[in-house]
Amino acid sequence: MINPLEDGTGADSPGRRVAAAVRDDIKALRWKRGDQLPTEPEMQAEHGVGRAAVRSALRQLREEGVVATVPGVGTFVASQDGQSQPPMSASQRLLADIREGIASGRLKPGDQLPRESELMETYGVSSALIRSSLRTLRKEGLIYSRGREGRFVGPESAPRRRPPTLTETVAAAVAERIQAGEFGADEMLPSEAEMERQYEVSKLTARAAVALLREQGWAYTVPQKGTFVNKPDNWPKP
């Protein structure tokens, strides 16, 4: 006989708690319509539950019309009215996100788009698909290329601006925590693996962020021990 607390169907079961967490994430816009949810193993790790609880949670959400599962592809957030719609592919989400960003003013004329490597990491697609999607946006007149400088929101006459890279964003977030006193002088910072989880970035990005913190003077690394906060005298000057 299956224990309802194990398969996630009990009143306060792990499955119901995971389902509630996913609903909260959708309400908070962590996941939007058409977005693909993490894989089952990723959800197990994130919520600290077993496979049965995750599957129970997804089953509950499907029955409520909150998500839709495409066999062999994954589980996606359904439309806000609860009707399951064909999920967007990663390249379609990229196109939709950039078009929406330009239409809403979040992406302004002259803004530089993220680099190919960052888009590949964000959307989980190949370089070829990224380039194909960006060609579509160029044909629509929404963006243009400047060789090695990168790709920018049109028109070309607008002054060009470069946003912070993902590495710079993570480093800035850690620096803010240092300035806020969350980490004191000579106190160990989160490991690269912890930064990967906390900021949802790759190992390479986490490592590059730590290197940037060292370069800026926020931190120093002791081989085989970890990375620690520098004394305030060594921090970058405002």
Image (spheres, grey):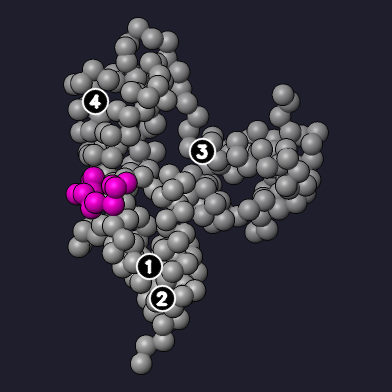
What secondary structure characterizes most of the magenta part? Answer: loop
The tag on residue 137 is 4
Q: Earlier in the sequence, mark 1 or mark 4?
A: 1
Mark 2 is on which residue type?
Gly
Q: Earlier in the sequence, mark 4 or mark 2?
A: 2
Question: Residue 209's image quarter?
Answer: top right
Residue at the spot of label 2: 8
Q: Reading the chain from its start, which is encountered first: label 3 or label 2?
A: 2
Q: Which residues are magenta?
A: 79-89
Q: Residue at x 68, y 42 (%)?
A: 177
Residue holding disc 3: 167
Residue 57, numbered circle: 1
Which amino acid type corresponds to the residue marked 3 in the rendered image?
Thr
> Do the numbered discs 2 and 1 sit on residues whose CB atoms are within 8 Å?
yes
Q: Position of residue 14 (x, y in %)?
A: 47, 72
- Residue 155: percent from the left, percent from the top? 32, 12
